[in-house]
Amino acid sequence: MRKILHIDMDAFFAAVEQKRHPELLGKPVVIGGAGDPMQRGVVSTASYEARTFGIHSAMPLQRAYNLCPQAVFLPVDYAEYKRVSLQVKEILMEYSPVMEDVGIDEAYLDVTDEERPPEEIAREIKKRVKEGLGITCSIGIGPNKLLAKTASDMQKPDGLTVITREDVPRLFHPLDVRKLMGVGPKMEGYLKEMGIETIGQLASVPKKVLVYRFGASYGNYLYDASRGIDESPLIMEWEPKSISREQTFQRDVVKWQVIAKTLADLTKDVVEDMKEKDYLGRTVTVKLRYDDFETITRGKTLPEPTDDEETLRKAVFGCLKRIELSRAVRLLGVRVTNLTKPDLPE
Ligand code: TTP
Ligand code: MG
């Protein structure tokens, strides 16, 4: 039996704004577009205070203004939300290496192999996020992603909800079918036309009826999902252990200038890749293959991790100096290892 947590931030964009502008705490806050309700644009999210006026995501800003003219309207500052999102994910990774990053404000965490009970881990995560970042999240715990995600939505905001297999009839089946993951507004319409209002009612429909009506793939999905069955694994992004570039020459090269220029170009490409993936590296390795296929490598470890092109290029040239260039060269490579992510500013 797996133990999966689903973490979803509460009113995420609005919460980040309320944290950095504490005077907005307790007030209706609407985030969307350019932050001007007189301009076109839709609501990205609304604080829970604003939601009591009927304001919700995807609503035109103008309509939100009509519902609550005293609300504070702010533009979307995606870079700031992304920064906070990364801090949340870093906290999560401390509790289990098996994390699926779903989006800016959600993630799954597999704590099956952790010794402590999942409720205890969830409570500690909530505390760390609240005390460290000044925002709240809701966590659902279940034997799979489907039930964990359903659970995280059940007691928002600041909730902690567990759904076990045994809880399926009592907690999962009474929910409206539109709460079932994978059921959008269109499907909700079809199901309701069939007289199916709740997930439990869907679970009483024979498999062959669902497959006949919706096709094998989606029909089978609905059959299993309505029973709280979901075997799907967490999808992780694997950290690359190195970033590298190689070049094989069309014709073997003897000239030092060509070799040096090639290594400088390869370093430039590696650095671009590092910056794009947000990595710093400490160890540089140069690989060189002679025309007779003998291959040698020389490495250098820097005092601290960096993504500075000049520093890395100097390290590469330092390696090159320790290589005897007496024969023609057919391949050159530059590799950076010992990769880390930069510390995020507080
Ligand atoms: P949600 O998790 O759907 O919403 P939320 O975090 O604001 O509120 P809740 O407490 O109900 O979880 O989405 C996360 C963020 O994604 C949200 O803060 C803003 C953004 N978003 C949009 O930009 N447009 C949208 O239509 C939705 C639904 C979300
Ligand atoms: Mg959310």
Image (spheres, rainbow, N blue to C red):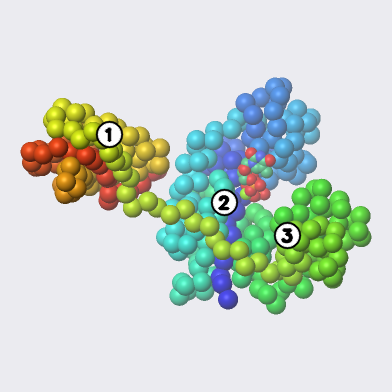
Residue at image position (18%, 33%) is: 253
Q: Quadrant of the N terminus?
A: bottom right
Which mark is nearer the camera, 2 or 1?
1
Disc 3 marks a residue whose amino acid type is Ser
Q: Is residue 5 left or right of residue 293?
A: right
Residue at x 33% of width, y 34% of height = 269
User: Nearer the viewer's eye, disc 3 or disc 1?
Assistant: 1
Which image quarter holds the C terminus? Answer: top left
Mark sitting earlier along the chain (3/1): 3
The disc at residue 202 is none
Amino acid beneath label 1:
Gln
Q: Is residue 31 above or below residue 184?
A: above
Residue 217's mark?
3
| Nearer the observer, 168 or 153 | 168
Give the CA separation, mark 2 to mark 1.
Answer: 44 Å
Mark 3 and mark 2: Cα distance apart in space: 23 Å
> Three-letter amino acid code at disc 2?
Val
Q: Residue at x 61, y 63 (%)?
A: 232
For the residues labelled 3 and 1, the Cα–Cα distance comes to: 50 Å
Estimate the x, y position of residue 168 in percent, counting from the top left: 73, 72
Give the residue at mark 1. 250
- Does residue 131 appear anywhere in the picture? no
